[in-house]
Image: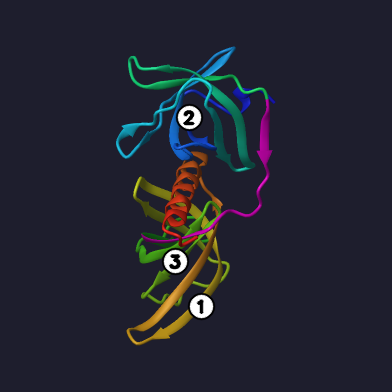
Amino acid sequence: MEVEDVLRVNQKITLVVPEGRNAGSYPSRVEDIGLDAVVVAAPTHKGAVLRLVQGDAVRIQVVRQDGVYKLDTAVEAVIMYPFPMLQLARPVEIVRDQRRRYVRVDVSLPARYRCLDRRGRKRLVPHKGTVTNVSGGGALIVTWQSRPDLEVGSEVDVELELPCGKVSAKGVVVRMSVERTEAGRVQQVAVEFKDIDERQRDILARYVLQRQLELRRKGLL
């Protein structure tokens, strides 16, 4: 497998710094792919460009439907013009982690979902809810709007409002439950994503990764 089989120019990626004071995972983008090097946008943290230097080990990570691709490399040069970029040594080994289970994190995100008819068409009225945990493979939606037309096996169109933008996916309801609280009936709807654009899944996977780091820093994970 070649680098070009995994990466493309303008592709959004996650740049992982495995150790040191800059250890962490950061969103980035592929700017150029050459015979000897890969150029990516220099990642930022808290509004400032991350201070990496020649020789720092980094990993390019890409989430796709068939797994997570990891390309270990190192910084060859820091480019400042026309904007901050990193020239990385062309990776010689590509590892694919064929994950069947996705990391799930607790969140509190607004969501909308619509039932689909047998032809996959959206119904007109969307239902509102709150996503309480999410992964690259699905989401758990909590809603006060108990829907009699929704059942296990129902196909739905889900729109999640992430801090970095909206993500849409088609899925199927795999589990449902109703809990009675002092405020009324709460319905929990577990949705497994069946059809999601690769770029949308990338956005979702990066958000989940960032959320993981945030929870770990707070000692909640």
Q: Which residues are magenta?
A: 93-109
The image quarter containing residue 193 is bottom right
- On the rendered image, what quadrant is the N terminus found in? top right
Is 166 displayed left or right of 101 in the figure?
left
Amino acid type, callout 2: Gln
For label 1, the residue is: 177
**Location of residue 19 with respect to 41 vertically, above or below:** below
**Location of residue 15 with respect to 104 vertically, above or below:** above
Amino acid type, callout 1: Ser
Q: CA gap, disc 3 to disc 1? A: 11 Å
For label 3, the residue is: 141
Amino acid type, callout 3: Ile
- Residue 11, disc: 2
Q: Nearer the viewer, residue 138 or 212?
A: 212
Residue sticking out furthest to the top: 35
The reply to whether residue 202 is in sight is yes
